Amino acid sequence: GNVKDSSRCPPRFFQKFNLCLNALNNIDARRHMNRACLAVNPPLIEAGTTGYLGQTTVISKEAGTECFECQVKPAQKVYPICTIRSTPSMPVHTIVWAKELWKLCFGGGEGEGSMLYEDPSLESSESEEVTESNKAVPKKDDAADTNKETADREPDEPSKDNKSVYMEAVQQKPANGTPNQSTLKECDTYAETLITTLYTTEVQKQLDMDRYKTAQKKPTPLDPLLIRKGCTETPVPNAKQHMTAWTPIQCVAVLTSVFHSVYSIQTPTNNQPFPNGEFDKDDALAMQFICAASNLRSHVFGIDMQSLYEAKGIAGNIIPAIATTNAIVAGLQMIQVLKILSLQQQTTQDPPQAVDTPPVKKLTEVCHYIYCQRNKNRKGYYLQPTTLPSPNPHCFVCSKATISLELDTTTWIFCDLVKTILKKRLGFSEPSVTVGDAGIWEEGEDADDCYAVNLKKILCDLPGNGMKDGTTINIEDFSQDLSLDICIIHRSEWDEETEPDQFRIIGGGEEASKPACTEIPTADAKKVSEETDKTKKNDEEDDDCVIENPPSSNQTVDKTGPNTNEASKKRP
C-alpha cells in the first residue's frame, strides 16, 4: 500500500513498532515517514543508494539526532517557460514539453494546468477591443503611441499575431465510446490534425515571425505527408524496440495508437481509467505518449532522439541501482537494527546490582551515520562511519522553527499556494491553514467544506485581513502531528529566468536563506571551508534511490580524522 495514505497508515500505526526501516525511492514518502516517526518516537533507520554509493543513518527524536529534513533537499530542476515552449536545446527540454502536452490533452477541464494552455477567450477579447478602437479614427499622436505599445509588447504576451494555433486543434477531442470503425477514424483524424498543428503549422508560423533568428539551429517543420502515413499506414513499434529510438513516422504511429486507447474504453489494451493528466512514469500509455511527442519535437529542433527506456529515465529522474550496493546498505541497516534492539532490551531490564557494571550506552554512542563508498579511503576501508549529527536548529520539522515565504501576494491564488508550496515543496499531507484567528482551509477527517470558497481567492483577499507583507500564518497537519508558522513577505518583481517558481522559502534549512557568495582570502579559505563543510549537506532525488552526490575518484576519507571526502560531508 501507499505509506502516505493517512487513512491506512496514520502516525499511530507506527507507534506499535520498536523501530522502522526506510527503503523508499522518493523524497515525499521519506518526508512522510520522517514526520510520522518523529510524531510517535520509534527510531527510523533511513538509507539510500545510487550506483556504487550508499549510506544509512538513524533518526530519533528521543536521542536528539538530525531528522531527514534538517538539511536542504534540492528541488526538482525547473526550466524557464520560454525555453520549453520556444527554444529547446536538450532532450530534457522536449520531454518536459511533452509532459505538459500530456496535461493539455488529458488534464482536467481544457488542460488549464499545463504551461502550454492558452485561454481561447483572449482572442475574442482582443477582437472586441480592436472593433471598439476602429469606431473612432485615432489622431496621429495616438496612432504613434499605439504602434509603440505594440512594438514594446513582450514576445510571450498573448496577441493576435503570436497566439499559438494548436489550442483549437486540442479542443476538438473525439468522443469516448466503444471502439468501432467510426471511432478509430475519428481518432485518426484528431491525431493527424493535432500533430500537424503542433509540429508543422505552429513551427512554420514561428519561423515566419522570425522567432528563431538568434537560435543556433532553426527548427524544421515536420512533413505533413509523413504525418498522414504515420497516422494511417505505419504499424506501432513492438515492445522489443524500447531500447532503440523510434523513427519520426513510428512516433506518429505511437501517438495515434495512444489516442485510440484513450478514447476507446475497455479495449484489450486499455483497461485503465481515462487519464487525468497527472504524469506517472509507470503508466505505459503515458510513457509512450511522452516518448513519441518529445522525439517528434526533438526531430523538429535537431536534438538527439531518445529510446523509450532513455525517455523514461529522464522523465522519471531515474538513476539505475546496483544490486550489490543495495545488499551492502541493507546489511548496514540490519546492523543498526541489532544495535537498537539490544539497547532497548538493556534499558527495559532491571538496573544492574553490581557496582562495576558499565552504564547503558546512549543510541548516539552505539549507532553511526555510515557511508558506503566506491573507492577505498587511505586506510583501505570502503565503509566510513561518522557520528550521528545533531538537529538543525532552523529545521521547522524537528526544531519547530518559523520560516519565511517570499511571493507576490497580489497575484498568487490560494489553491496554488496549498498545492505547490505547502504540499509539493514543504511536504504537508493534509494542511489546515489559519490567518490570525480566522481559519481559511481544512483537510483531513471532519474537515469543513465551507472553506472551499477560499481556494480561488487571491492571497491578499483572504479572510482574516488576508495574506500580506508581514502576515504570519499557521499550518497544522494532524496526520503528521506537525505545526508550522510561516511569515509572509510580499515581493512583486521576479526574474523568470533565474526564479521561474516565483516564490522563495527562507529558513528551515532552505538554500534560499544562504547569503550571496563572496570571495575569501586564500589564507582563510581552508578554515572557512572546514567550518562550512560541517553543516553542508545535500541530497539527490530519483525514483530508484536517493543519496548524496558521488565523490570523485581521487578523494579520500580518514576514518578517524576530519572528513575530506565530499560524499562524507553531504547527507540526505
Image (cartoon, grey):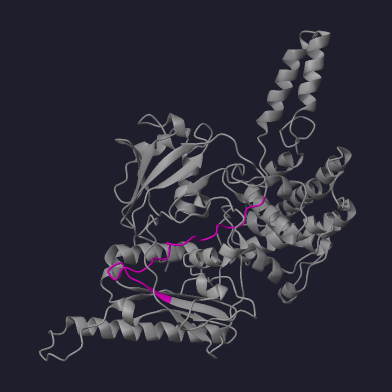
Q: For the view shown, which residue lies furthest in the left direction?
A: 353
Residue found at x 37% / y 31%: 463
Q: Is residue 493 left or right of residue 235?
A: left
- Range of the magenta residues? 57-79
Q: How many labels, in total?
A: 0
Residue 510 located left or right of residue 483: right
Classified by dominant secondary structure, the portion drawn in magenta counts as loop
Q: Closer to the camera, 212 or 111?
A: 212
Q: Quadrant of residue 273?
A: bottom right
On screen, residue 14 above or below 87: below
Q: Quadrant of the N terminus?
A: bottom left
* Residue 539 pos. (x, y %): 53, 66
Asked if residue 512 lies in the magenta stretch, the reply is no
Give the x, y percent position of residue 492.
Answer: 56, 34
Position of 448 compared to 196: left or right? left
Measured as percent of width and height from the top left, residue 244 is found at 77, 73
Residue 539 visible to the viewer: no
**Which residue is painted at 59% across and 64% down in the image?**
523
Give percent across and percent down for residue 479: 33, 57
- Of residues 541 and 294, which is closer to you in this image? 541
| Residue 267 left/right relative to 568 | right
> Can residue 491 be seen by looking at this rendering?
yes
Looking at the picture, does residue 53 appear above or below residue 109? Answer: below
Residue at left offset 62%, top offset 63%: 522
